[in-house]
Image (tube, grey):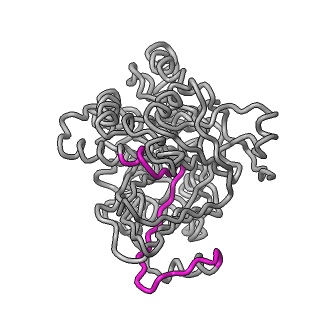
């Protein structure tokens, strides 16, 4: 199997799980303080009239409102017309990172400007893309060279967990579809529990202890670091009947006709009463016991939010919940027809808070299995299995490797009920309960999205 070569290559991420604590400690020292605030503002802050125009367009959900605001620039705006070297806009999930989300937002207001910081509980990424970027494009069409330069050079930082980053990346891909390139590259301030996307692209695995000074370093990196590519994968769920209750954000219901072309290409028969769902993932999709544990954890956290006060508390709750679900007490040998209790489809090197279940495989093993070295932009997914709780624990401790199954450029799962009338599935940490019928199959098909996501390489 040949690997499609794409440049620039995503960074090597093997040490990430082990250095995340060191990254947090390192940010307490001089690394964040070495960035001069005035120089940072010159580098990333847009002129006042542009900031106000973009903010007005997003707030009103009307790019024309932003264009009108730009035309009314005052004396201060007339002077401040030089475009930033590399303008940066920040999306903040104020609900992530325990108490840090709101505090981070205030700090960002101090360092850059309120108009370039968007709270995702108030502003959706799609609103910024449709109306904020739309405003810049309209101004550029009217001959505003400053707005044109900003649109071309703009970069985005996302302060949140993997789910938040995936949300923003998913919205940015619409720019390809609408032929509104260039697509701004994305960097990450890790506020989530696992932060595997942040680890994979050199942004660290946890929010730094000395975060107030480290934020300047994040912003400076966002403006100066090189970019690389990340494969995106679309999952299509086709059910013979019924619907998914408690639909996760990662999955959207779609009309069966939208799935008909895919079914014809892959020789899949679409039932007359089919229900279809689509979603995009960047890190992993899994089916089985790990998804069941994630599903229970999410429900517990929603019912008792006071328990989830940050990444450490979340991990403790998750570990405790895993022990109550029978994963450690129901080995595969109890059901001879089962060889694994979880199937995981992995795109990134990091999984489960920086663990490396696929592992660093030696050349002779790769050749024997017909595998190639895994990268996050190689057009391939790694498929592995976890046998039961003890096996998963040893894999996560990196004492052993997961059960390697295959590498694939496209995947089709076919599931039917029997003893069970449901399965548990998750994409990038967002789980759901998947109904199953005994007489008809539920299909999950995974295919590569034709255009990659652009990431900022924080390792550099």
Q: In which quarter of the image is residue 62?
A: bottom left
Q: Nearer the viewer, residue 167 or 359?
A: 359
Q: Nearer the viewer, residue 39 or 258?
A: 258
Pinpoint residue 297: horizontal percent, then vertical percent: 30, 42
The answer to whether residue 380 is magenta is no
Quarter of the image that includes the C terminus? top right
Q: Is residue 108 above or below residue 276?
A: above
Q: Is residue 26 above or below residue 306?
A: above
Q: Nearer the viewer, residue 289 or 98?
A: 289
Residue drawn at x 65%, y 61% is 410
Pinpoint residue 104: horizontal percent, then vertical percent: 34, 33
Query: Does residue 47 show up?
Result: no
Residue farthest to the top, as pictured:
29
Residue drawn at x 81%, y 52% is 2
Residue drawn at x 56%, y 26% is 398
Query: Does residue 431 show up?
Result: yes
Pinpoint residue 170: horizontal percent, then vertical percent: 49, 58
Pinpoint residue 344: horizontal percent, then vertical percent: 53, 47
Q: Using residue 53 as the reference point, say whether residue 394 is left or right of it.
A: right
Q: Using residue 247 as the reference point, say whether residue 376 is left or right of it.
A: right
The total of numbered circles placed on residues is 0
Q: In this view, does 131 lie above or below 332?
A: below
Residue drawn at x 48%, y 50% is 286
Q: What stretch is highlighted in magenta?
A: 265-292
Q: Quadrant of residue 268?
A: bottom right
Q: Which of 329 and 306 is in front in this view?
A: 329
Residue farthest to the bottom, as pictured:
272
The answer to whether residue 285 is magenta is yes
């Amino acid at each position: 199997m040949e690997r499609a070569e794409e440049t620039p290559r995503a960074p090597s991420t093997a040490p990430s799980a082990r250095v995340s604590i060191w990254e947090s400690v390192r940010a307490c020292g001089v690394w964040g303080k070495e960035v001069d605030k005035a120089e940072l503002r010159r580098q990333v802050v847009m002129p006042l009239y542009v900031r106000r125009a973009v903010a007005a367009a997003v707030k009103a959900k009307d790019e024309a409102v932003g264009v009108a605001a730009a035309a009314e620039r005052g004396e201060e705006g007339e002077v401040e017309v030089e475009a930033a070297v590399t303008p940066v806009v920040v999306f903040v999930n104020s609900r992530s990172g325990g108490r840090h989300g709101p505090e981070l937002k205030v700090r960002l207001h101090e360092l850059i400007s309120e108009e370039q910081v968007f709270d995702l509980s108030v502003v959706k990424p799609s609103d910024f893309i449709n109306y904020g970027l739309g405003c810049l494009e309209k101004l550029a069409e009217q001959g505003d060279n400053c707005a044109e330069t900003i649109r071309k050079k703009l970069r985005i930082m996302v302060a949140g967990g993997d789910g938040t980053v995936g949300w923003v990346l998913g919205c940015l891909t619409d720019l390809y579809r609408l032929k509104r390139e260039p697509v701004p590259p994305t960097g990450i301030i890790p506020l989530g529990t696992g932060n595997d996307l942040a680890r994979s692209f050199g942004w660290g695995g946890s929010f730094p202890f000395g975060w107030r000074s480290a934020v300047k370093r994040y912003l400076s990196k966002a403006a100066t670091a090189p970019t690389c590519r990340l494969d995106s994968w679309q999952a299509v769920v086709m059910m013979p009947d019924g619907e998914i209750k408690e639909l996760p954000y990662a999955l959207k219901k779609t009309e069966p006709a939208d799935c008909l072309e895919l079914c014809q290409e892959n020789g899949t028969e679409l039932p007359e009463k089919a229900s279809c769902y689509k979603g995009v993932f960047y890190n992993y999709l899994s089916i089985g016991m790990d998804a069941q544990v994630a599903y229970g954890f999410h429900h517990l956290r929603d019912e008792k939010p006071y328990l989830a006060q940050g990444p450490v508390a979340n991990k403790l709750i998750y570990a405790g919940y895993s022990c109550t679900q029978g994963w450690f007490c129901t080995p595969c040998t109890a059901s001879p027809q089962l060889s694994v209790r979880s199937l995981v489809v992995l795109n990134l090197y990091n999984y489960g808070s920086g663990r490396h279940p696929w592992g660093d495989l030696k050349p002779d093993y790769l050749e024997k299995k017909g595998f190639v070295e895994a990268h996050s932009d190689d057009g391939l997914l790694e498929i592995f299995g976890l046998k039961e709780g003890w096996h998963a624990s040893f894999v996560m401790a990196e004492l052993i490797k997961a059960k390697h199954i295959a590498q694939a450029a496209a995947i089709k799962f076919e599931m039917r009920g029997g003893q069970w009338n449901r399965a548990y599935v998750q994409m990038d940490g967002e789980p759901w309960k998947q109904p199953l019928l005994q007489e008809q199959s539920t299909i999950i098909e995974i295919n590569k999205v034709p255009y990659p996501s652009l990431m900022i390489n924080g390792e550099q």
